[in-house]
Amino acid sequence: MTVLFRLLLCVLLAQAAVSRAQPELLPALLGGSGAGELRAIEPLVWSDPWTARERLMALGDADAAPTFEAARNLLLAQSLVYLHRNDELAEAVAAGNAALEGSSPARLRHYLAMLDGVSAARQGDLDGALGRLATAAAEARGADLGGIAVLATAELGYAHTHAGNYEQALQVLQGAAEAALASGDAFLVAVVDEVYGVLYAYLDEYDRAIRYFRQALANYETLAYPVYVAEAVYGLATAYRYSGDREAALAAFRRYRDIMAAHGDAGGRFSALYGLGMTHAEMGNCETALPVIAEALGAGGPTDYDAELLKRAAVCHARQGDSTAATAALARAREIIGGMPELAGTRWDIGLDKAEADMHAALGTYEEAYRALDRYQARQLALQRENASERSLSQRAALENARQALQIELLQEQARVRSLEIGQQQRELRNERLGFILLAVGLVSVVAVVLWRLRDLRRYRALSTRDSLTGIANRRHIFDRLEDLLEGLAPGRGSLSVVLLDVDDFKAINDRHGHPVGDRVLQALAASLAGMLRPGDEVARVGGEEFLLVLPRTDRDGAVQVAARLRETLRELRVAAGGAPIKVTASIGVATAGPGRDNPAALYAAADEALYRAKASGKNRFELAAAVS
């Protein structure tokens, strides 16, 4: 019996090393009437926040003791964080703070202070959120409440990201990541990974954003926290959307909608409608998009997100020829963004000019379109320079490398600790008749740990540099290569050009022949481009139907020759589609490095502007970016 008991203890200890208890919300010494009921509800805050909300609201009592009310409102507020009931969240936090007394447990005070910052962010008060969350994180660390400090720091990183303070967000999240990894708490690690996903999506590093969202999703699914699973799925859908993989985005947005609907959550309805409406609009499916956008605008979502919907609605109305509705939608979007000074100069604000350019282009008023596009390009370039500055890029790489190094170090340390624990168990069981069985269990556990850690280490190695559909380089690789080439380009002692190509009417090919044929078009085009490269040239797929050629040692005239040869090559390209072969054409933009185009973002933006003119001028042609002095 003793041997069996020790064998069971060995298994339980091994399990404890890879699992964590649910996050602790209530203080250990909470007592008094009703404390037992609150402790029974506490696990539901994570596993079923919808039920937790109902039960906690039913417990409200004006005559309850202050500590009980503070604790009840804390649980209620945490339940509401991702239920999209921002007014209820603000009320619960305010009531919890009002019930605090001088003798209230420190965990209650610091957790409510963190939730106060979260509530401010959810209400759109980013300046208030930044101050409150920074204070909450510092005070929680000072009170030795590490878990609360990590959550507050992660939320601070999210608020900085939403406010466009990307360098501050990177710095803040580095500290949160180190503390979460050191704690070994899977939930804290997942929360930080999720915010990293949001940050990298804002930085247009979609491969990295998708990786972090997937890591967070895997942990949330293991913990069985459905509302957090839903939020990670939503983040993943948004990253897919921005990366151009809109079919994957639609599938993920639908999964999010289904998770929330299964729990009768009307609060998630706006988020699902927002994602679906924006994605359909970006795909050009305006007949589908406009009704969904109208439904979303009536669902009572955050006003800044309403502005994004209105931008898309303006372009869709313009494509349908309704200039009055288009102009009204864009004017309303400008009114909303203008009423939020903290968004001035951010991508939310700058996107208004891009929406105006797209709207005028769809209406055929090209002069206005070009003026709006010029404004957008100038402001976007300034923002990209700020985000892609040499200091920011090197700092970002250093922070990411430090984070991965810490993960590897902690994994190795955990494996060493596990080995020591198993060795101790083996020594304790040495004189037992079944000692050899426990030794076998220990060896198997060590092997399992090593294999598991090796899998984690491989996951944090460098990401693949190839595009899975076409086999050529992907966006991440080509921009890293372009950055290296530009850094080594001495002024006046070398040339570098890029050619940006976008398949004309690719959506029509997908709609008429199906996505498998569209995939064959992209594969055939990639093979054709790779076949015409010179030694040292590189080509990559950087978007859905967009390809970028990097041409070292090539001046403006040489790039023009490449673009002309490329257009002639495409004229001969045919792709089988069951009936008549498909003829493929493309619009091309050409840009050469020089003053003001000495970083990847600026050079790419110049080529993109030239491509935009090629599209607007009738497609199946190439245009040059303005020459640099």
Image (spheres, rainbow, N blue to C red):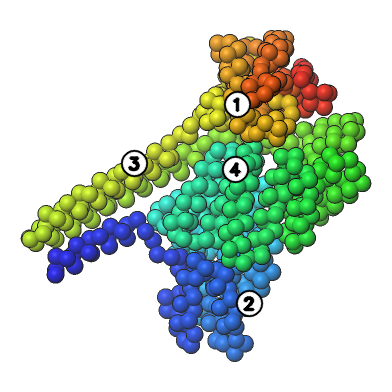
First in sequence: mark 1 or mark 2?
Answer: 2
Q: Do we see residue 481 in this rendering?
A: yes
| Residue type beneath disc 1 | Arg
Task: For marks 4 and 2, give the one nearer the viewer.
Answer: 4
Q: Which residue position is annotated with label 3?
A: 454
Q: CA distance from mark 4 to mark 2?
A: 42 Å
Q: Could you say where residue 497 lies in the image, as x and y percent from the top left?
A: 67, 17
- Report the side of 440 relative to 81 (left or right): left
First in sequence: mark 1 or mark 3?
Answer: 3
| Residue type beneath disc 2 | Ala
Q: Which mark is residue 95?
A: 2
Where disc 2 sits, the SS reads: helix
Task: For marks 1 and 3, give the one nearer the viewer.
Answer: 1
Q: Are marks 3 and 4 in contact (CB under 8 Å)?
A: no
- Report the side of 232 relative to 429 (left or right): right
Q: Quadrant of the N terminus?
A: bottom left
Q: CA distance from mark 1 to mark 2?
A: 60 Å
330 or 313, which is in the foreground? 313
